[in-house]
Amino acid sequence: MIEITNKFSVKCKKCGTENEIDINDFGVAEINSEERNMGYETEYYWNCVFDCFKCSNSLEVIPRAFEYPIGVLNYEDVECHGCKIIIKPEFSIVNEE
């Protein structure tokens, strides 16, 4: 399982205000999984849609990370609409027991 371990921030493209994001405000990750050669590849993503704290411009941030093989953080990226990343999210593998 992958989690985001920090608060990260984006800058609104309309007014320039920095907006801090606490991923806990957006619930648990959506998960997609498919079988590959070395087991399952699992994609974790959070669809964060909110309004800029200053100008109410609609912002969308989609942090995404892939676990493949199980227990290995293979790839990560962040898609942004209406904003740009200032502080990137940090992803971490969490062992489920």
Image (cartoon, rainbow, N blue to C red):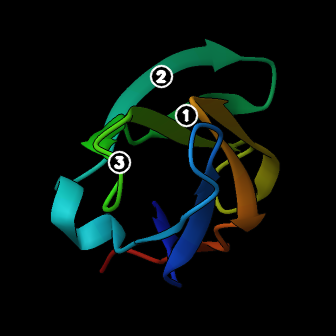
Horizontal arrangement in the rendering, residue 46 relative to residue 18 (left or right): left
Q: Position of residue 81 (x, y in %)?
A: 58, 26
Residue depicted at x 64% and y 56%: 16
User: At x 75% / y 66%, what residue is drawn?
Assistant: 86
Q: Label 1 is placed on what type of residue?
A: Thr
- Check if mark 2's residue and mark 1's residue have beta carbons within 8 Å: yes
Per the image, label 3 sits on a secondary structure element best described as: loop
Q: Is residue 49 left or right of residue 20?
A: left
Left or right of 72 on screen, residue 39: left
User: What is the count of numbered marks?
Assistant: 3
On residue 58, which mark appears?
none
Give the residue at x 49% y 77%.
94
Give the crowd class for mark 1: few <14, some 14-19, many >=20 residues within 10 Å: many
Q: Position of residue 68 (x, y in %)?
A: 73, 41
Q: Nearer the viewer, residue 14 or 83?
A: 14
How many residues crowd around disc 2 within 10 Å: few (fewer than 14), some, or many (20 or more)?
few
Give the distance between the C-alpha atoms of the residues marked 2 and 1, in whole angstroms.
4 Å
Amino acid type of the residue tagged 3 in the rendering:
Cys
Residue 42 has which mark? 1
Question: Could you say whether the residue bearing mark 2 is in a helix, strand or loop?
Answer: strand
Q: Which residue is mark 2?
A: 33
- x then y, percent, for residue 55: 35, 48
